[in-house]
Image (cartoon, rainbow, N blue to C red):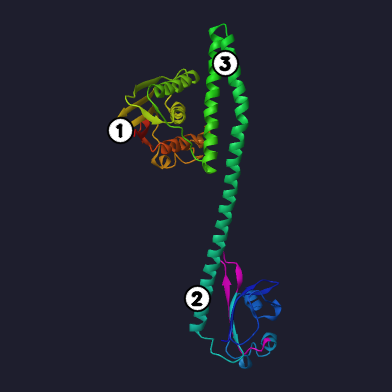
Amino acid sequence: MGFSAIARVTEEKWITCSVRDDISFGLKPGDELDVETTLCHEVRQFDEPIVIDDVKNDPDYCNHHTPAKYGLQSYISVPIYRKDGSFFGTLCAIDPNPAKVNSPETIGMFRLFSDLISFHLNAVEEMDMASKMIEDQKRVSELREQFIAILGHDLRNPLASSRMSAEILLKLAKDDMSRKYAEMIKATTYRMDRLIENMLDFARGRLGEGIILNRKLYNGELEESLEEIIKEMRINSPERVVEVDMQIARDVMCDRERIGQMFSNLLSNADSHGTPGNSIKVKAFTREDKFYLSVLNSGDRIPDSAIKHLFQPFYREDAKQGKKGLGLGFFIASEIARAHDGTIKVDSSEKETNFTFDMPLD
């Protein structure tokens, strides 16, 4: 057959998608024919292949307008369907001379090629759809990260005003009740400040800046920072008992503020998810060439399927239970650990869950 083509065929149009032309038929990809002058139009209408060996001797097509218009004597056209079963077009071939095409072998070959084209069309469409989804998700992600960064900066000023007001109230307070509430307000502003820092760290990380460290050698000062965070939690959750065991025998080269931020995230999680009335156990110590910090709380076991995703941004295994939060705490904690060349490990049993951070001392 001297001319073959893949054609997109609709009710209104016949368009060539791909062409092989050895007889100078004159069509190129993208060219159109009046669809009603083609036999492909009938293939679409009747949903059946059309196969002609010799037009002059074919009782159905010897007087048909299409062979007369295009000067063809042999012809084959089989339908091409999309994966969903909708009609796409045809795989067709023509020749100005008679040819033996009406055979099971030839028709079977054309059907096979038609199926391969259908498979390719589906793959291309799925790839285009996947690319579009990726682009859409990328745009949403970029907008979300920009929003988080802007929101974090805009919250800083009113938060600083609230903290300053709480400090003034503490100085002016004349009774224990007033001092208690002023302390709670002040502690809450620090907690909010850490949440904002989580958001900003996430935005900075996604925008290329990453977690920035200011490492120094600490010993007693590191313990004081951790104790201050525990004190803030006790003010916000006075019913929660925190058992503390700190034995930091060696200097730790770290960013004290970042370690405090990570610890606050882990401690806040233990307070939120630990069994009410049960204590939280905190340990901080140096052993051999490592610094360890662990937070243990009683409570339900974290499923293995959830542990795999805990340190991903915006993941909240308990979202369906209505608990609030952005789902950034564990992610930021893991990024701080990684910036210190350390890791956070999770051990969860039926009765308790333990998060342990370790980092090299040298």
For the residue labelled by badge 3, is the local secondary structure a helix, a strand or a loop?
helix
- How far across and down, in percent of the image, does residue 88 sit? 61, 70
Label 1, residues with CA under 10 Å away: few <14, some 14-19, many ≥20: few
Kind of residue at disc 2: Leu
Taking the image as shown, residue 64 lies to the left or right of residue 309, namely right
Indicate whether residue 83 is drawn in magenta.
yes
Q: Which of marks 3 and 1 is nearer the N terminus?
A: 3
Work out how far the residue at label 3 is from the one at label 1, CA to CA, in angstroms: 41 Å
Task: Return the x and y of residue 135 as percentages of the image width and height.
Answer: 58, 53
Q: Which amino acid does label 1 sit on?
A: Asp
Give the mark, 3 or 2, whose residue is nearer the N terminus.
2
Image quadrant in which you'd find residue 188: top right
Query: Residue 215 placed where, x, y %?
Result: 43, 32
Choose the circle earlier in sequence order: 2 or 1.
Answer: 2
Which mark identifies residue 289? 1
Question: Circles 2 and 1: CB distance less than 8 Å?
Answer: no
Name the side, left or right, on which 188 lies relative to 280.
right
Q: Mark 2 sits on what residue?
A: 112
Helix, strand or loop under label 1: loop
For mark 3, what is the residue? Answer: 167
Regarding residue 28, the answer to whether it shows in the image is: yes
Viewer-closest of 63 and 202 = 202
Query: Where does the magenta region start and end?
Result: 70-89
**Does residue 142 show up magenta in the picture?**
no
Mark 2 and mark 1: Cα distance apart in space: 67 Å
Toward the front, the furthest residue is 216
| Residue 278 can be seen in this image | no
Task: Name the residue at 42% across, 26% down.
Answer: 275
Quadrant location of the N terminus in the rendered image: bottom right
Q: Mark 3 Cα within 10 Å, few/some/many (few <14, many 20+)? A: some
